[in-house]
Image (spheres, grey):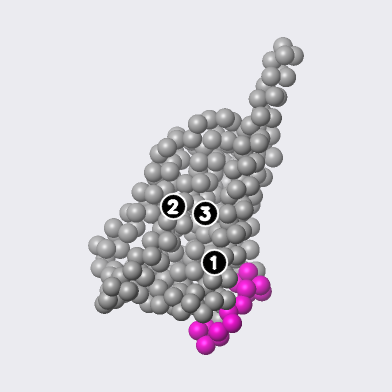
Amino acid sequence: MGIGVRGSQGTTQNRWPPFLAAVGAMALAAVLGLAATAYVALRTLRGLRLDAEAMNAVGSPRLALYRLHEGLTWVSVGSVALSLLACVALALVRRRFDLALGAVVVIGGSNVTTQILKYHVITRPDLSQGPNSLPSGHTTVALSIALAAVIVAPSAWRSIVAIGVSATATLVGVATVLGRWHRPSDVVAATFVCLLWAALGLLTAALVGHRLSGNAPHVSVHLGALIGASAVGGLLVLWGVRPQAGMRDLGLGLISLGAIGLACAVSVAAVARVADRHLG
């Protein structure tokens, strides 16, 4: 009996190094990515110019813009609160207080950090282009909820959840660029903020729950995130979203909107993978 307990404790201890390596790599990538994005987009002449050009490289029909703007109006303090309550409720139904706390850390930390960075830390040197808007608050709201959702979702549902939340976060991020509310760098920076807090949320859940699993992650969680982001691209094409005239605008549009979709998909896939493998 005692040997069994010691063996179980040893197995659990052996699971901590790969988990800590995963969340540590996630946090490091987020910090370095955020710093690099902010520096290039705000402190280099080429970055400032390309960022502004990328924002204007793609045009949208009036009906598409109306739909996108209408969707963005749902991003509010109230929607954040309701989404947080939904994530916490799902985790508690599963009797997983650890995951509920992790979701609170992700959503709360991401949104508070974005507001502090945008209004009190990061400055835009060229004020002729308007006040600082990096990171994007709308994207932070959408992606932080998305990452919290894949953390609290049961393993059997996680792939389906990844499709929906990846698509939603990508659509919100792209909509802010198409509506000229944000530059592409603002959206990408927001994904790094959310990824950092997702790593901290996963760590919090593991420390509170005192349990780590050694499950093999489902490949479908990665595919789900990519499918969700890719579906947004198809939807935008159906709505008539097109690059402005010229191959340069085509390239800038594909790169900027593609980067947003990829950033959202990779963030969801990475968090879903760690949750699937280590938290259950």
Residue drawn where x is 37% and y is 70% of the image: 252
Spatial separation of the CA atoms under disc 1 and disc 2: 18 Å
Q: Name the foreground residue: 179 vs 34.
A: 34
Eye-nearest disc, 3 or 2: 2
Q: Residue at x 66, y 35 (%)?
A: 16
Quadrant (top left, top right, bottom left, bottom right) of the N terminus: top right
Q: Which residue is mark 1?
A: 37
**Disc 3 marks which residue?**
145
What number is the disc on residue 265? 2
- Residue type highlighted by circle 1: Thr
Tell me the amino acid under the disc marked 3.
Ile
Residue 118 belongs to magenta span: yes
Provide the residue span drawn in magenta: 117-130
Between 212 and 65, which is closer to the camera in this rendering?
Answer: 212
Whichever of callouts 1 and 2 sits on the residue coming sooner in the sequence is: 1
Q: Quadrant of residue 151?
A: top right
Q: At numbered mark 2, what does the secondary structure look like: helix, strand or loop?
A: helix
Residue pictured at 42% horizontal, 71% vertical: 177
Residue 4: x, y in percent? 69, 15
Does 216 sit above or below residue 228? Answer: above
Does the magenta segment cover residue 137? no
Dot in front, 1 or 3: 1
Q: Position of residue 202 (x, y in %)?
A: 61, 45
User: Residue 205 at what x, y percent from top left?
Assistant: 64, 42
The secondary element bearing badge 1 is classed as helix
Q: Is residue 50 left or right of residue 128?
A: left
